[in-house]
Amino acid sequence: MQQEEKQETKETLQEEQQAEPKAPTISAELLTAARGDMTLAILEVQRAYGLPAYITDVIVSACLSDIRDCANKELISK
């Protein structure tokens, strides 16, 4: 009897683990590279439009706000 319960519990746990999508592993190297790419992209836009640093800051802050809103919606919908 106990053996059957253990087997059912094990199978249920395996099914739950398979049903949940796994988040990708994010390494320090990936984060560093992504941050560098984003910084370069921001500086390229700043240079292309001739924006002063304070205007670039306003634009980047607005973009971050949009990203945070999306992240919050994703967390709420889970």
Image (cartoon, rainbow, N blue to C red):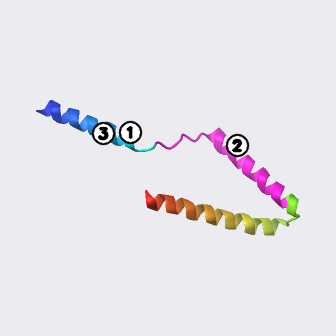
2 or 3: tag closer to the N-terminus: 3
Residue identified by numbered label 2: 33
1 or 2: tag closer to the N-terminus: 1
Disc 3 from disc 1: Cα separation: 9 Å
Q: Quadrant of the N terminus?
A: top left
Figure check: 33 above or below 44? above
Between 53 and 10, which is closer to the camera in this rendering? 10
Disc 2 from disc 3: Cα separation: 36 Å
Q: Give residue 13's mark.
A: 3
Disc 1 from disc 2: Cα separation: 31 Å
Pointer 2 with pointer 3, Cβ within 8 A: no
Tell me which segment is drawn in magenta.
22-46
Pointer 1 with pointer 2, Cβ within 8 A: no
Question: Secondary structure beneath disc 3?
Answer: helix
User: What secondary structure do most residues of the magenta stretch adopt?
Assistant: helix
Figure check: 43 above or below 55? above
